Image (cartoon, rainbow, N blue to C red):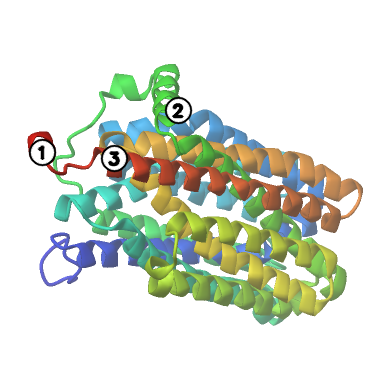
């Protein structure tokens, strides 16, 4: 950046974190503006929950197919151009969703969403971690990731509240299609995504990027997959973290897909009365912000470190999902959402810290993409199967199934903890001590 425009220096860790946190927060705000009414918008346009689940599954399958080579692409040509391409695809996907009328436009949304999500996962986060480590090689990642998470959850709080309220606030304006109904929230999200794209151009500096892979290698998907999976197997904790990541995907897509249909059983689905979804958006956003602040303030003090925090959060999230599924009244929906999103916020920071600490720097984007790939496998499995269950029976049953799976998957972190204890004992055994000759004497 030019001097004087912003004081977020890329020459110290606080400046790097401040710049990335602001950008990530604005991006999160753009995501959450339409999210509290997204499923209601789709069902209001005549789509069933099975259609919604199928669209989310197609998106997730595309991410799975494209995730690894696009992560390698970021290692080859730079994080910035890949991030910009991701944001452009996502912007286009929501333009299709704004005008969705049936399966053709829904498919277009899913396709561009999948490409955008695949490009996104290995780019900006890798840029951020690289910049941190370039300034301070020994930087502790969890406090900085927690700061970013606070910015994101604060933006989520504002976005979710405003997005839920917008349809009710605009109901008296007699807006034309496609802005009528819940469409106004999608338009607001589109405008913010365009702003984020421009800010990425201005804020993400990557002079003379030195590619860690050749472009031909980055585009060779079988080679990248083999390389990433081989590295994943070589790192002892990664299989457990990947299992936990898949469960996180199932849980998140289940909550995002079903909480609005469950809430509509009590509150209805009228755009003019969408204020209640703004209040529920405030509840989940406030809980997420509280979780991020708790990690930033107390995360380093928790006995057992990130692995204990991640495992406890997984259990708490499952409890919130069960509460949401079992109690469809207003209090139950609000409490279940709040507990689940508090746990999501606390788990994400701890899980990301575990993954980033485990992987080598020169393959960060690839292994982050492998991790994201497994997460989206969970999304695909959850959305395709549970969407059909919800459509044929009840969204509460589908969410209850996802909650049970989430509860069982918490044991993956027990495997991580066991490996960490074993490696700590080995490190103590191999630590340099008294010279053998001195010991003999």
Q: For the residue carrying disc 3, how many other residues have a C-alpha within 10 Å: few (<14), some (14-19), or many (20+)?
A: few
Q: Which residue is mark 2?
A: 233
Of circles 3 and 1, the one toward us is 1
Of circles 1 and 2, the one toward us is 1
Vertical comparison of 17 with 92: above or below: below
Q: Which residue is mark 3?
A: 429
Disc with the residue nearer the chain's start (1 vs 2): 2
Residue 105 in view here? no
Residue 192 point in image, percent of width and height: 46, 64
Disc with the residue nearer the chain's start (2 vs 3): 2
- With 47 as the anchor, is 133 left or right in this view? left
Which quadrant of the figure contains the C terminus?
top left
SS for dot 1: loop
Q: Rounded to the nearest whole Å, what is the CA distance between mark 3 and mark 1? A: 14 Å
- With 91 as the anchor, is 316 left or right in this view? right
Q: Nearer the viewer, residue 190 or 438?
A: 438
Locate residue 69: give its quadrant. top left
Locate residue 215: give its quadrant. top left
Residue 137 in view here? yes
SS for dot 3: helix
The residue that appears at 39% across and 75% down in the rendered structure is 297
Residue 338 point in image, percent of width and height: 65, 72
- With 33 as the anchor, is 6 left or right in this view? left
Residue 257 point in image, percent of width and height: 71, 55
Instruction: Identify the disc placed on residue 435.
Output: 1
């Amino acid at each position: 950046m030019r001097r004087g425009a912003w004081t977020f220096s890329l020459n110290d860790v606080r400046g790097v974190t401040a710049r990335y946190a602001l950008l990530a927060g604005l991006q999160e705000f753009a995501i959450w503006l339409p999210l509290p009414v997204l499923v209601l918008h789709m069902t209001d346009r005549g789509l069933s929950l099975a259609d919604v689940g199928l669209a989310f599954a197609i998106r997730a399958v595309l991410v799975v197919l494209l995730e690894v080579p696009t992560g390698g692409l970021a290692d080859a040509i730079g994080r910035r151009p890949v991030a910009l391409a991701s944001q452009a695809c996502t912007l286009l996907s929501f333009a299709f969703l704004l005008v969705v009328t049936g399966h053709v436009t829904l498919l277009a949304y899913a396709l561009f969403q999948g490409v955008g999500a695949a490009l996104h996962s290995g780019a900006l986060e890798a840029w951020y971690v690289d910049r941190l480590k370039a300034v301070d090689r020994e930087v502790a990642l969890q406090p900085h990731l927690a700061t970013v998470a606070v910015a994101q959850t604060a933006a989520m709080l504002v976005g979710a509240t405003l997005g839920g309220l917008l349809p009710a606030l605009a109901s008296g304006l007699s807006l034309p299609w496609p802005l009528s109904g819940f469409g106004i929230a999608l338009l607001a999200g589109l405008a913010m995504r365009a702003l984020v794209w421009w800010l990425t151009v201005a804020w993400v500096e990557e002079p003379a990027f030195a590619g860690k892979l050749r472009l031909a290698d980055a585009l060779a998907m079988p080679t990248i997959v083999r390389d990433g999976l081989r590295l994943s197997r070589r790192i002892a904790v990664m299989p457990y973290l990947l299992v936990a990541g898949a469960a996180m995907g199932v849980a998140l897509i289940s909550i995002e897909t079903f909480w609005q249909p469950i809430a509509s059983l009590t509150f209805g689905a009228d755009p003019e009365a969408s204020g209640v979804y703004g209040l529920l958006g405030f509840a989940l956003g406030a809980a997420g912000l509280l979780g991020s602040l708790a990690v930033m303030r107390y995360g380093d003090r928790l006995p057992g470190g990130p692995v204990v925090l991640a495992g406890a959060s997984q259990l708490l999230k499952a409890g919130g999902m069960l509460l949401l599924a079992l109690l469809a009244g207003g209090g139950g929906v609000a409490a279940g959402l709040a507990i689940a999103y508090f746990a999501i916020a606390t788990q994400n920071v701890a899980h990301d810290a575990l993954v980033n600490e485990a992987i080598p720097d020169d393959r960060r984007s690839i292994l982050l993409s492998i991790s994201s790939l497994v997460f989206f496998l969970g999304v695909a499995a959850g959305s395709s199967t549970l969407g059909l269950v919800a459509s044929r029976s009840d969204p509460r049953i589908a969410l209850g199934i996802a909650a049970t799976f989430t509860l069982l998957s918490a044991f993956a972190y027990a495997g991580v903890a066991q490996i960490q204890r074993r490696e700590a004992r080995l490190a103590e055994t191999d630590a340099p001590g008294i010279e053998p000759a001195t010991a003999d004497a």
